[in-house]
Amino acid sequence: MYIPKHFKIEDEVKICEFIEKYSFATLYSTHLGEHYATHLPLILKKDENALYGHFARPNGQWKDIENQSVLVVFQGPHCYISPSWYEIKDAVPTWNYVSIHIYGNVELIEDEKVIYDCLDEMVNKYEKPDSPYNLINVDSKYIEGMSKGIVAFKINITKIEGKAKLSQNHPAERQGLIIENLDKSSNQNDLEVASLMKKYL
């Protein structure tokens, strides 16, 4: 990924926080000799330096992905930045965003307990704290049957790139004007970018 020095994220804690929050990712590999991508939620296990997830079994991407070097992209909020917000007239528009690229090698998982634990962790991550739903309450034979319809995998991380393009290359006054205008928006992306700018600048 092209990352000018202003925009590089080097703080591992920030990268992990970002992946935890924006965990619906795009997994790119080569499948049948062509570029191929699947959109899916992934779980980061920092202690293993790995990502866990699963494919729907009919998705053929899994059939030739093992031992490939793959790319995973975590994309957060992003928005248009209008030069009309600046303190000067001669300016051009831009786009602010945060993105994390992870590279790694894939291994498929067949151990039923590991698969169940990964599914359970994913459900617990996304269900609200007061939700009555829990895998432990679902008939084990039903879970076993449904699990046959997926292919679980682990990505052993080899490289991480983090980019936060949040107007760091602009003067402080202009950054403040951008945040001020984004905070007035009713668009959720605009508000989240404003919040990220406050965090990173």
Image: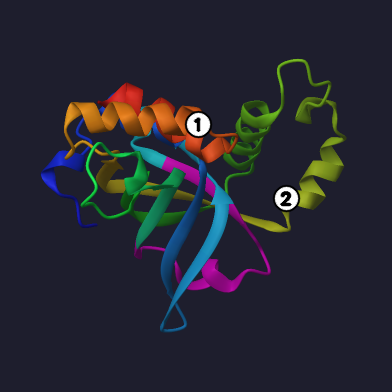
Mark 1 residue element: helix
Q: Splitting the image into 4 quarters, where does residue 116 fall?
A: top right
User: In this view of the protein, which residue sits in the foreground, 82 or 28?
Assistant: 82
Query: Residue extending furthest left?
Result: 5
Q: Of the residues shown, which amino acid type is indicated by label 1? A: Leu
Q: Mark 2 points at which residue?
A: 147
Q: Is residue 188 visible?
A: yes
Magenta residues (range): 51-69
Q: Please tell me the numbered disc located at residue 121.
A: none
Q: Which residue bears the numbered disc 1?
A: 191
Instruction: Answer few, some or many: residues within 10 Å of disc 2's Cα (few below 14, many 20 plus, some between 14 and 19).
Output: some
The first of marks 1 and 2 along the sequence is 2
Q: State yes or no: discs 1 and 2 in contact (Cβ < 8 Å).
A: no
Q: Position of residue 68 (x, y in %)?
A: 35, 65
Which class describes the residues within 10 Å of circle 1: few (<14), some (14-19), or many (20+)? many
Q: In which quarter of the image is the N terminus?
A: bottom left
Q: Which residue lies furthest to the front in this view?
A: 89
Amino acid bearing label 2: Ser
- Give the x, y percent position of residue 166: 30, 38
Per the model, the C-alpha gap separating discs 1 and 2 is 38 Å
